[in-house]
Image (tube, rainbow, N blue to C red):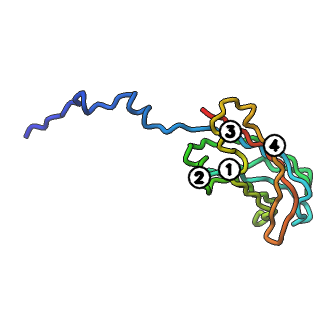
Amino acid sequence: MESTIQTPTASSAVTTSSISNQVPPFHLLEISVISAQNLAPVSKSMRTYAVTWVHPSRKLTTRTAQKGQTNPTWNDKFAFRVDDEFLLSDNAAVNVEIYTVSWFCDVLVGIVRVPICELITPSVLTQKNSSKNTRFVALQVRRPSGTGGTTLLTIVYLPY
């Protein structure tokens, strides 16, 4: 029994141009987690770090601040690749959780969640000058028992 191998025809071949047309346009959302002030003292010795994300499947972590206790400084920068659908979504948000290192299980100090629509307005989405798309924001850190400090973030939106 002979087996034949079919060769691709011009209509079945995948071209580079057809692949590039399938990739949706993306933007970079650059987030700098700078510091926190007046965090709730949830443990005697606080060595804190922050976990940042815009998509739950891709969380990034700052270095652990060895000093600072309730006033840590990280100055860590993260870049997230986002698409138009994300930027225009009502549910899109920047999330930051602050933890302190503990022996058995790290302890949640507080949470910051800010909707993208409060950081990037529709008019900014159409601008191409990235210097006009930088926002410095101070956000309230929330604890289950109430408020507990302030986190400073820099948000940069880079359209491509």
Evaluate if marks 3 and 1 touch, with contact meaning CB atoms under 8 Å apart: no
Q: 10 Å neighbourhood of mark 1: few (<14), some, or many (≥20)? A: some
- Which residue matches tag 3? 124
Q: What residue type is labelled 3?
A: Val
Alpha-carbon distance for marks 4 and 1? 14 Å
Q: Nearer the viewer, residue 47 or 116?
A: 116
The amino acid type found where label 2 is placed reads: Ser
What residue sits right under mark 1 in the picture?
Answer: 116
Closer to the N terminus: mark 3 or mark 2? 2
Look at the picture and state if 70 lies above or below 136. Answer: below
Write down the residue under mark 2. Answer: 89
Distance from disc 3 to disc 1, alpha carbons, whole Å, reads 12 Å
Q: Is residue 8 above or below residue 31?
A: above
Q: Residue at x 86, y 55 (%)?
A: 150
> Label 4 belongs to which residue?
136
- Secondary structure, mark 3, is helix
State the residue lying farthest toward the bottom: 145
Q: Do the residues labelled 4 and 3 touch (CB within 8 Å)?
A: no
User: Does the CB distance between marks 1 and 2 fall below 8 Å?
Assistant: yes
Is tag 1's residue or tag 2's residue first in the polypeptide sequence?
2
Q: Residue drawn at (23%, 30%), measured in percent from left and top?
A: 8
Q: Disc 4 or 2, which lies upstream in sequence?
A: 2
Query: Residue at the spot x=81%, y=50% of the render?
Result: 64
- Residue type at tag 1: Ile
Work out which quarter of the rendered image holds the C terminus and state it.
Answer: top right
Q: Can you give x and y, in whole percent of width and height, for residue 41 in the image?
A: 90, 64
Residue type at the position of mark 4 = Phe
SS type, badge 4: strand
Q: In this view, does 93 lie to the left or right of 18?
A: right
